[in-house]
Image (cartoon, rainbow, N blue to C red):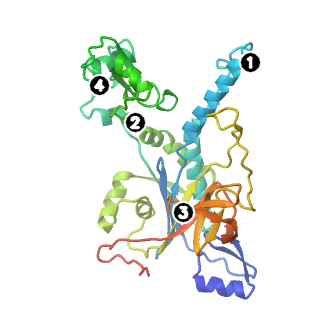
Amino acid sequence: MPCSARKARLLLRQGKAEVITRTPLRIRLLCATGETVQSVTLGVDSGYEHIGLSAVTKSKEVYTADMQLRTDIVALNSERRQYRRCRRYRKTWYRPARFDNRRKPEVWLPPSIQHKLDSHVKGVESIHSLLPITDVVVEVAAFDIRKIKDPSIEGTGYQQGEQYGYANVREYVLYRDGHTCRHCKGKSKDPVLEVHHLESRKTGGNGPGNLVTVCLACHGKVTEGKVELDMKPSRGFKAETFMSTVRWMLIDRLRKRGFTVAPTYGHITKVNRAKLGLPKSHVNDAFVIAGGNGQLRSATHYMLKQVRKCNRKLFKGDRSHIRNTAPRLIRGFQRYDKVLYDGVECFIIGRRTTGYFDLRTLDGTKVHASAKASSIRLLERASTLLIERRLALLPALTDGVSAPTIR
């Protein structure tokens, strides 16, 4: 179980413990001790971009974290697929197509969704390595996408989508926009209409939300960059689809790892959070999900961020003959190393072969744009999961709810 910072310092000074990890500070006792532990409940506020984690005992909150997931996997895989296809069209044109002789496993998820599911499990297991977790409570949700789009839908309306009765997507988009250019509103008098992708097809798709009607004259100006459309693609329902897809997969995977898992739902979390007078946030939701109802809140919380392990792209891509020649280590430092600069803990985000580094915190706050290697000190080596310790700025709670004084 966690101990006070003073006790940890004394144990280390007396040689009765050794440091295992620095953030969060974890020590291993080198002497015999009892095995009495408290029951700890872990609350997981699952999400598409952020995961809220909170470990709570009967008396206090012992750990809280906000985990930020990767959102660049779709774009990176799309770029990789684009270059691969182009290369194979040039060099292996004589080989038969392979798209129709591959079979996916029975339980298959797209890489981006698989990463997010794995990250949820990784977050729970990382806390389990710190604390004796006895119960895990996970907030799950199922979303009715059709009901979100059209609240009045019912009955047979679910069998007739928004494109029902139209020959294809193009015909539907033209009818939706009234066969009128969305940019010039028909002022160009051009009778030829085109369906334009607001976002690149490789990442935005061919759905109606990413398509808009423009005339031939405006379409040429848009593609040449002379005109910029003021319309944006629809937000989509990626987060809702993700939660509906992996909710039971997440619970099953945690149970297979030996955790006692119980599901809960967003409306329950909302009611309990309102009773405590807490604002909406991932860590507050996780605290409520874990059964928090007046325990002493943690004065610090951790910000976790998932990053890619390495960049294996050989060429930059914009100009194919320019290679990626940046070495992995420069003056003994690499990207995503945690360093100390002028008393501030930060991460190396950019590096130069001359020995200067771009230093920032995990939320993007710039510490120094070009710090010398001699002015920084290595704290932790790079990892795919970056961790930063912060003060928890807790709001005023309702009467009867305790909170530590933060200085």
Q: Alpha-carbon distance for marks 3 and 2? A: 30 Å
Residue 224 placement, left or right of 35: left
Indicate which label's residue lies in the foreground, 3 or 2: 3
Cβ atoms at labels 4 and 2 below 8 Å apart: no
Dot 4 corresponds to which residue? 182
Query: Is disc 1 in contact with disc 4, using a CB cutoff of under 8 Å?
Result: no
Image spot of residue 332 (x, y percent): 75, 62
Counting other residues with Cα less than 10 Å from the Cα at mark 3, is it few (<14), some (14-19), or many (20 or more)? some
Q: Residue at x 33, y 21 (%)?
A: 213
Circles 4 and 3: CB atoms closer than 8 Å: no
Q: Which amino acid, by three-letter code, is at mark 2?
A: Gly
- Local SS, label 4: loop
Question: Of the numbered discs in the image, which one, if any, rests on residue 236?
Answer: 2
* 3D distance between C-alphas at marks 4 and 3: 42 Å
Element class at badge 3: loop
Q: Quadrant of residue 82?
A: top right
Q: Amino acid at mark 3?
A: Thr
Q: Amino acid at mark 1?
A: Thr
In whole angstroms, how far apart are the C-alphas of marks 1 and 4?
A: 42 Å
Q: Is residue 361 left or right of residue 208?
A: right
**Does residue 140 show up?**
yes
Q: Is residue 54 above or below residue 407?
A: above
Q: Where is residue 183, by image quadrant?
A: top left
Residue contact at pointers 1 and 3, CB within 8 angstroms: no
Amino acid type assigned to the residue bearing label 4 in the image: Arg
Q: Is residue 50 left or right of residue 377?
A: left
Q: Residue at x 52, y 59 (%)?
A: 136
* Residue 361: assigned label: 3
Labels 3 and 2: the sequence-earlier one: 2
C-alpha span from label 4 to label 2: 20 Å
